[in-house]
């Protein structure tokens, strides 16, 4: 995948000149930060992030960042409060260290599920986080598969929204799912139709939709299946899998409708609580996810396949630094 990404609109390779750029990673996903650094062929910046005895975070940048363009990789995943606070403290540290630009790379944007006010006296936490990051000193944000695309509009600074779908699509094509007459791509809800349609077009497959309602958070009732599932191998795609309840109930509903196989794909493998066991013990044949958030060994299971996001992030970072187009990375994802 890296070879495809390293081509520009005219087919010429991008310059490898990354002078003036520095890459740092918080504690949320240090392994991913190192993989991005390896992709770019640079060293990961030195930074100390520890805790005081009372639990307060202490951050120290261990090398000069004056006049540099800084990229900070920090998904605000669990523990969300700690990773978000660490990001804000890192922003303040680099701003006071006279960095020229501070680009926040959030492979996973936490607190995104409350992106609008539905009930009285509800907060809009996605906007709150945007305000905190922007006011903390970020000059640009890079995110992967935001839970709601309108979150981009919560910022007054540039936001590069990257899509994980092409990575999943290319993997499925390699696995032989393209142009298979038995395959149908399924959106687990109406809000994810755009993502599912793009994957369906990549695979030259039809589209189906699960119409559902949520009586309360992390609870789901399947109301209706829109489209044909009987005799099909179903590929459900969503931005995240949290407790696993939605995809498991969706898979059960599809099989009851006559599907012969159901697999689930997602960008963010949140896997809260006993989600890993629930997915392994479910009727799902496979689960394909990406490593935008760390997946510890304890949360990995036999049915799980993890795809790397580092080449996508590395290529986007390189193009941003060199003032090249980022959107052309997704010419096959419309």
Image: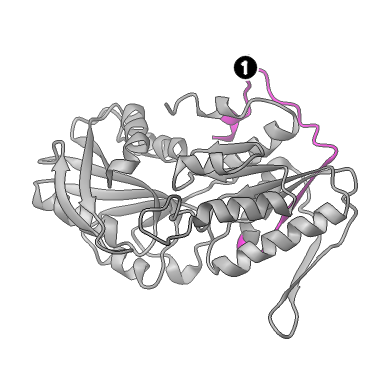
Q: Is residue 248 visible?
A: yes
| Colour basis | one colour
Closer to us: 326 or 290: 326
Asked which quadrant contains residue 172, the reply is top left
What secondary structure is the stretch in magenta mostly built from? Answer: loop
**95 lies above or below 321:** below
Asked which quadrant contains residue 303, the reply is bottom left
Q: Decide if residue 259 is on the left or right side of residue 328.
A: left
**32 lies above or below 192:** below
Local crowd size for mark 1, using a 10 Å CA cut-off: few (<14), some (14–19), many (≥20): few
Residue, far front: 120
Residue of label 1: 11
> For the point 9% across and 46% down, which residue is it?
258
**Magenta span contains residue 16:** yes
Please provide percent x and percent y for residue 22: 80, 46
Closer to us: 94 or 33: 94
Q: Is residue 108 visible?
A: no
Please provide percent x and percent y for residue 211: 20, 46
Name the secondary structure under disc 1: loop
> For the point 33% across and 27% down, which residue is it?
201
The magenta stretch spans which residues?
Answer: 1-28
Q: Decide if residue 193 is on the left or right side of residue 97.
A: left
Q: How many marks?
A: 1
Residue, far bottom: 53
> For the point 64% across and 44% down, which residue is it?
141
**332 lies above or below 97:** above
Quadrant of the frame with the N terminus: top right
**Magenta span contains residue 315:** no
Please provide percent x and percent y for residue 319: 68, 31
């Amino acid at each position: 995948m890296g070879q495809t990404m390293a081509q520009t609109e005219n087919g010429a390779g991008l310059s490898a000149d990354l002078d003036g750029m520095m890459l740092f990673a918080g504690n949320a996903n240090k392994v991913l930060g190192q993989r991005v650094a390896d992709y770019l062929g640079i060293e990961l910046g030195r930074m100390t992030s520890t805790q005081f005895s009372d639990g307060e975070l202490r951050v120290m940048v261990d090398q000069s960042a004056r006049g540099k363009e800084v990229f900070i990789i920090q998904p605000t995943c669990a523990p969300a409060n700690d990773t978000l606070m660490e990001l804000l403290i890192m922003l303040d540290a680099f701003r006071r260290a006279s960095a020229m630009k501070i680009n926040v790379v959030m492979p996973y944007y936490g607190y995104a599920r409350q992106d609008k006010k539905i009930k009285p006296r509800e907060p809009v936490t996605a906007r709150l986080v945007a305000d905190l990051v922007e006011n903390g000193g970020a000059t640009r944000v890079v995110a992967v598969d935001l839970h709601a695309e309108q979150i981009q509009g919560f910022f007054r600074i540039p936001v590069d929204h990257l899509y994980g779908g092409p990575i999943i699509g290319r993997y499925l094509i390699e696995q032989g799912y393209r142009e298979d007459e038995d395959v149908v791509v399924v959106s687990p809800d109406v809000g994810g139709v755009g993502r599912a349609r793009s994957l369906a077009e990549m695979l030259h497959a039809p589209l189906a939709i699960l119409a559902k309602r949520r009586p309360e958070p992390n609870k789901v009732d399947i109301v209706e299946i829109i489209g044909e599932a009987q005799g099909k191998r179903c590929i459900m795609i969503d931005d995240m899998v949290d407790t696993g309840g939605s995809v498991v109930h969706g898979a059960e509903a599809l099989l009851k409708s006559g599907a012969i196989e159901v697999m689930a794909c997602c960008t963010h493998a949140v896997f809260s609580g006993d989600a890993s066991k629930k997915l392994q013990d479910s009727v799902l044949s496979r689960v394909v996810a990406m490593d935008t958030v760390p997946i510890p060994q304890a949360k990995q299971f036999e049915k799980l396949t993890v795809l790397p996001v580092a080449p996508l992030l590395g290529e986007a970072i390189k193009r941003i630094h060199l003032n090249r187009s980022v959107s052309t990375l997704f010419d096959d994802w419309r």
